[in-house]
């Protein structure tokens, strides 16, 4: 197989990974959601997440386009109809994320560099020793509600649920993490109240959190996390992109679960 030399990344985690493993020269265009490193050669921004400039992508004459998730399925179809070569992945779990990153490393002939970064990734995401966070007043895992979207309420994707558990928390909607579609992870406000999380973590897909919107929901004044002011935002790029930056999101989760 010929190593691709002109790659378009429609999702940020792929661009980030190619930059980390030394394949940035092979990148021809990126999504606007990727914060390009200041010391790197800037690449054209050719897409959002669910939208893309198909004509501009075609003009780049890419030999590979990398897409992620069912949200980009229509983009993938449109690009393929134009005769372009597209790799679409739909990873949802931490193990699937590792496998996808390893695949990207093989595609650009950077397997050794990829494995070095994956070794660091695995180590950084290893489960926290639960005893290290215990105090005389707390022996149980804190109950956590992760809100991925607010209209309608959507609980966390599988890898987020896994990271909460690795950090020492209990995801109150872990029973839904096997649902691969966001629509299947929708929850009612009343159910959140019933499950009564002690911590609420929020990442609204790039939209800033409005804490007052959460605290003013009917009946939520009875939720432990609201009563105790334990509502925290995590940057989308650190928790909702299935790539290396989950390392930073995981550190943030560990900090927030046991800081109060």
Image (cartoon, helix red, strand yellow):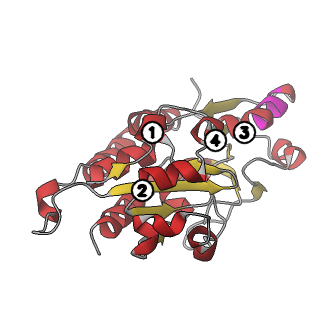
State which quadrant residue 197 falls in: bottom left
Question: Is residue 163 toward the left or the right of residue 193 in the image?
Answer: left
Q: Please tell me whether residue 106 is drawn above or below residue 251 in the rendered image.
A: above
Of callouts 4 and 2, the N-terminal one: 4
Q: What residue is disc 4 on?
A: 5
Helix, strand or loop for disc 4:
loop
Mark 1 vs 3: CB contact within 8 A: no
The disc label shown at residue 72, or none: 3
Side of 116 relative to 34 (left or right) = left
The magenta stretch is: 75-80
**Per the image, is 160 magenta?**
no
Q: Label 2 near label 1: C-beta < 8 Å?
A: no
> What residue sits 25% from the left and 49% below the top?
126
The residue labelled by disc 2 is 196
- Whichever of callouts 1 and 4 sits on the residue coming sooner in the sequence is 4
- Based on the displayed image, in which of its 4 quarters is residue 66 positioned? top right
Residue 239 on image: x %, y %:
48, 56
For the C terminus, the quadrant is bottom left
Work out how far the residue at label 4 is from the one at label 3, CA to CA, in angstroms. 23 Å
State how far apart marks 4 and 2 are (Cα).
51 Å
CA–CA distance in space, label 1 to label 3: 17 Å
- Considering depth in this image, is 172 or 120 the residue closer to the camera? 172
Q: Quadrant of residue 67?
A: top right
Q: CA distance from mark 1 to mark 2?
A: 30 Å
- How packed mark 2 is, by other alpha carbons closer than 10 Å (few <14, some 14-19, many 20 or more), is many
Residue 47 vs 93, above or below: the answer is below
Q: Which of the two discs, 3 and 2, labels the residue nearer the N terminus? A: 3
Identify the secondary structure beneath mark 3: helix
| Callout 3–callout 2 Cβ contact below 8 Å | no
């Amino acid at each position: 197989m010929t190593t691709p030399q002109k790659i378009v990344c429609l999702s940020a985690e792929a661009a980030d990974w190619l930059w980390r493993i030394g394949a940035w020269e092979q990148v021809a265009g990126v999504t606007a959601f990727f914060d390009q490193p200041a010391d790197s050669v800037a690449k054209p921004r050719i897409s959002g997440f669910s939208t893309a400039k198909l004509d501009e992508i075609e003009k780049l004459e890419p030999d590979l386009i990398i897409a992620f998730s069912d949200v980009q399925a229509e983009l993938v179809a449109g690009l393929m109809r134009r005769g372009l070569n597209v790799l679409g992945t739909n990873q949802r779990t931490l193990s699937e994320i590792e496998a996808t990153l390893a695949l990207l490393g093989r595609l650009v002939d950077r397997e050794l560099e990829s494995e070095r970064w994956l070794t660091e990734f695995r180590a950084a995401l290893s489960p926290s020793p639960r005893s290290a966070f215990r105090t005389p007043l707390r022996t149980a895992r804190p109950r956590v509600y992760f809100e991925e979207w607010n209209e309608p309420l959507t609980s966390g994707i599988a890898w987020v649920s896994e990271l909460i558990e690795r950090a020492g928390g209990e995801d109150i909607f872990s029973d839904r993490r096997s649902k691969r579609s966001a629509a299947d992870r929708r929850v009612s406000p009343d159910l959140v109240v019933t499950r009564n999380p002690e911590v609420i973590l929020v990442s609204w897909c790039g939209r800033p959190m409005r804490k007052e919107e959460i605290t003013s929901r009917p009946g939520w004044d009875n939720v432990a996390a609201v009563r105790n002011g334990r509502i925290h935002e995590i940057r989308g790029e650190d928790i909702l992109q299935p790539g290396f930056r989950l390392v930073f999101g995981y550190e943030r989760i560990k900090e927030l679960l046991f800081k109060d």
